[in-house]
Image (tube, helix red, strand yellow):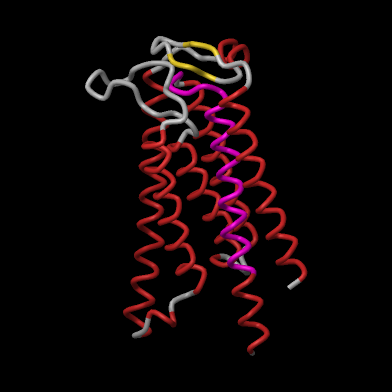
Amino acid sequence: MRSVKKQALFTIALFLLFVVFTVLVKTVDVRVLGETATDVGFGALNAATLCPYHESFYEISQYLGYFALLLCGVFALCGLYQWIRKGSIKKVDYRILLLGGFYLLVLALYFGFDKLALNYRPVIVDAAEGLEASYPSSHTMLALCVFGTAMLFCRVAFPNKRALRAASIVALGALMILTVATRYLSGVHWLTDILASILLSAALVSLYSTCVSYVGARRTRRN
């Protein structure tokens, strides 16, 4: 259980870093920036690193988000199949059950930050929507969390197939990098929005990993 405690401390540290970074974004070098003329922290940094709006990159990032949601559906179907085949939800792989709770937490944060609106996008993508919340990039957070936890599952899904496991991890890692890159290059987020989403995603995936390790250790001790 000592390793689980270390994981838990690491997870807490990541969440604290996100909180500290958020406080800094709201208080340091706040300037009125962007086409939307809204207050943005780390003004000099965000102004210097803002990319012009690029529709193609925006659409690619959107499709990557849809793929992440599709992957969520795949895991949900796996859990449902195990539930039906084994006749009890208690017999479903605990990693999948924890993943279901993890997805609910990520979705709650997705919609919660949208309502909280700590920052607004530098451009108006949809005139009907008007100003849209941008901190952290919830789209990036969702994709990174889904792809990140999927990487953890590769060890379970392909325990004896190293080549396939490695290929899956590389592919998921590439999707994570592509999501971050296209979302940033699309110009619909400030740099601090993207950095915050990476930090929060790392904390959330670490939380999931810690929970899996904790439950796994308890099950091992019982047996």
> Is 208 displayed left or right of 138 in the figure?
right
Image point 43% across, 17% down: which residue? 122
Of 178 and 136, nearer the camera is 136
**Quadrant placement of the C terminus:** bottom right
> Is 147 displayed left or right of 100 in the figure?
right
Residue 206 in magenta stretch: yes
**Relative image position of residue 136 (x, y in whole percent):** 50, 34
**Relative image position of residue 51 (x, y in whole percent):** 50, 14
**Relative image position of residue 72 (x, y in whole percent):** 39, 55
Q: Residue furthest left?
A: 128
Q: Which residues are magenta?
A: 187-213
- In the image, residue 105 sits, relative to residue 116, either above or below, namely below
**Relative image position of residue 82 (x, y in whole percent):** 38, 76
Q: Residue furthest bottom?
A: 223
Q: Main secondary structure of the magenta part?
A: helix
- In the image, residue 74 sits, relative to residue 114, either above or below, namely below
Residue 185 in magenta stretch: no
Image point 66% across, 53% down: which residue? 12
Image point 68% across, 60% down: which residue? 8
**Quadrant placement of the N terminus:** bottom right
- In the image, residue 178 sits, relative to residue 212, either above or below, namely above
Q: Residue furthest right?
A: 2
Image point 45% across, 50% down: which residue? 106
> Is 79 displayed left or right of 43 in the figure?
left
Q: Residue furthest front?
A: 27
